[in-house]
Amino acid sequence: MDMKQKLQELHEEAVRKIQASEGLERLNEVRVAYLGKKGELTALLKGMKDVSAEERPVVGQLVNETRNKIEGILEETKKKLEAAALEAQLQEEVIDVTLPAKKAQIGHRHPNTIALEELERIFIGMGYEVVEGPEVEYADYNFTKLNIPEGHPARDEQDTFFINSSILLRSQTSPVQARTMEKGKLPIRMIAPGRVFRSDEVDATHSPSFHQVEGLVIDKKITLADLKGTLEEFARELFGPETKTKFRPHHFPFTEPSAEMDVSCFKCGGVGCRFCKGSGWIEILGCGMVHPHVLEMCGIDPKRYTGFAFGIGLERIALLKYEIDDMRLLYENDVRFLKQF
Ligand code: DAH
């Protein structure tokens, strides 16, 4: 077979294979098989040495033409295959912009948080600062500096989570009073919200972990009238301007005198209902004038300074404000419950 014929056949075979290629990868394999270094056309060229000198330029030109034709059809086929691949990809990735979007789920503030922010707003409005203290506390701050000496029944292990004999999970936010007074910056007007811990059984009104908001004011000439005025104002802000308050004598080791404050039932206006258990009053906080001995232990001269303190149970406020009848609901974190507030 002469060279011309071989080239003709090679060309036809290449074109057939190119057209039969089903993807870009296969096409490349065909290209390499014919035009590559070890390809068929290159192999043919090696046979040129057998061609006579006068025929060589003609055959050489023929080889080039064949190569060009194969390259041409390769290029053309490559473009077609690329276009088809792009089309297939576009088909697959089609986005329906008319589909409804996924709704972003926005969280809800916990009723405790809402109540706390309300309390903070009221006290900040009266010039108070918001401070924090540690949840793991020294017995010294939780008890001793608050006039609860060693051996006092309030330290009972039944009520308190001790870590060792001198460190515990604070059972109240009152230790923040001692910490603030010890800093020595007077006057003081602060509230200290936070988590407290007691070894209590869980029921509708008890939990081993709950929250309090402590309050402390220390300045010259602070009297019981300041305490009453402040807390009455607070109650009216929180529960409405018609709210009445009542102070009942009580005992706390770190205040003298001490009291508990009740507010007139905001549900029935004081007549008596299921909400206030028929009494017309609802207890909301403990308070009192800071005991002179506490002032002394915290480095403040009780002859020059006096003050008052109070402690509010945050959950109690949240339960009252949102008429929730079981404290456990506040800790279950059921979104269906939380999103009502
Ligand atoms: N710490 C008290 C408790 O846990 C609450 C309390 C009462 C705080 C009177 C005070 C206060 O600051 O003056 O029962």
Image (cartoon, grey):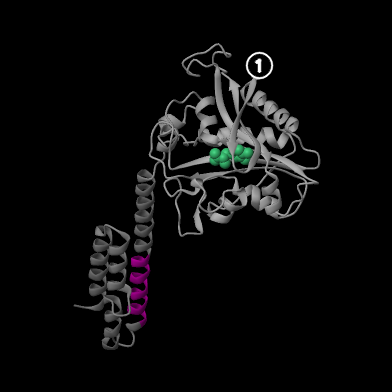
Membership of 66 in magenta stretch: yes
Write down the residue under mark 1. Answer: 242
For this rendering, which residue is in front, 258 or 124?
Answer: 258
Q: On the picture, is 232 further left or further right than 79? A: right
Quarter in which the N terminus is drawn: bottom left
Disc 1: CA contacts within 10 A as few (<14), some (14-19) or many (>=20): few
| Residue 238, position as x, y percentages in the image | 63, 26
Task: Magenta stretch: give its range.
Answer: 57-71
Q: Quadrant of residue 242?
A: top right
Query: Which quadrant does ligand 1 occupy?
Result: top right
Q: Residue at x 55, y 26 (%)?
A: 283
Q: Residue at x 22, y 78 (%)?
A: 2
147 to 260, vertically: above or below: below
Membership of 202 in magenta stretch: no
Q: Quick check: can you spot residue 4?
A: yes
- Number of numbered callouts drawn: 1
314 to 172, vertically: above or below: above
Disc 1 marks a residue whose amino acid type is Glu
| Residue 263, position as x, y percentages in the image | 60, 23
For this rendering, which residue is in front, 2 or 325?
Answer: 325
Q: On the picture, is 116 further left or further right than 96? A: right
For the stretch drawn in magenta, the main secondary structure is: helix
For this rendering, which residue is in front, 90 or 332?
Answer: 332
Q: Quadrant of residue 237?
A: top right
Q: Residue at x 69, y 54 (%)?
A: 182
Q: Given the current orientation, which residue lies at the most extreme top position?
A: 271
For this rendering, which residue is in front, 30 or 171?
Answer: 171
Q: Quick check: can you spot residue 311?
A: no
**Secondary structure under badge 1?**
loop
| Residue 69, position as x, y percentages in the image | 35, 66
| Residue 337, position as x, y percentages in the image | 42, 30
